[in-house]
Amino acid sequence: MEKFKTYFLMIGLTLLFIWFGSLVGGRTGMLIAFVVAVGMNFYAYYYSDEQVLKHYNAIPVDENSASGLYKIVNNLTTKASLPMPKLYIIQDNVPNAFATGRNYEHAAVAVTEGLLNLLTEEEVEAVIAHELSHIKHYDMLIGTVAATMAGAIAMLANFGMFFGHSNDEDRPNPIVMIVLMLIMPLAASIVQMTISRNREFMADEGAAKLTGHPEWLQSSLLKLDNYAHGNLLHDAQPQNAHMFIINPFLGLGGDMKQLFSTHPTTQQRIERLEALK
């Protein structure tokens, strides 16, 4: 069922992108949008996980090189009826973690050295359970595709004037086109952020159920939040910020920036977890 919902969302976002392309540039815009959407979805599906792991210089580890982490993940995957994901450690002192991969068989979990050093074993277990919940519900692929399509729509809007001067008879009214160029990127970003925030709440709940201890995740979120306000993850990128358990840019903005964040506030997440006790 989760796989069906994931593919349905991918198709829906793709059709939205193609529709916007047709409005901006008529038949030419629709064709270009179709080609771009197919290419971007193909890349996101097969290669986005490799790209993000390479970007953060994630080092693969196994039972021999990271026995404690491996044991935690192995125990949780058994409880969750999931295959063992590939494990990676990022050599960064800022504590954070993310999951990536297109499906159960190609999933990976990456944690920073800072997370392993800062959190207790129970808190690490809660963070891993959160990431495994993302894997369980195909959130990594959904988030990647949503972010990709939001970026593509913004790119298409930037080229809207170029498409609008085509010779297509069905090119849009210039006023309508300008309005769409302003509204559609914002709407796409809101859709992306809504999807991401809802998935974070779901992953938190899944982690609480998997460990049986919501307070472990509450404690880890507080520590991660406090650290993130004063430290920035090395080489952090806005386009993959939604993947992390804590927004790596948390310390860079105020209340207004939170309106456009891919994550709920830590306080909101803790309150949701409190209700599960």
Image (cartoon, helix red, strand yellow):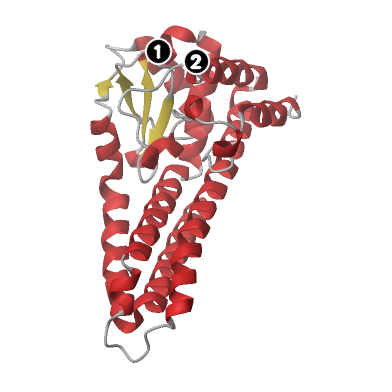
Provide the secondary structure element on which disc 1 rests.
helix
The answer to whether residue 108 of the structure is visible from this angle is yes
Circle 2: residue type: Tyr
Q: Residues within 10 Å of mark 1 (few under 14, many from 20)?
A: some
- The residue that appears at 59% across and 42% down in the rendered structure is 259
- Please give the residue where the numbered disc 2 appears in the rendered image: 227
Q: Mark 1 points at which residue?
A: 114
Near-viewer residue (67 or 208): 208
Q: Please determine whether, in this image, residue 158 is positioned above or below residue 227.
A: below
The answer to whether residue 138 is above or below residue 83 is below
Q: Who is closer to the viewer here, 131 or 240?
A: 240
List x then y, in percent, for residue 158. 34, 62
Q: How crowded is mark 2: few (under 14 residues within 10 Å), some or many (20 or more)?
A: many
Q: What numbered label is drawn on residue 16?
A: none
Q: Is mark 2 on a helix, strand or loop?
A: helix
Q: Residue at x 54, y 52 (%)?
A: 190
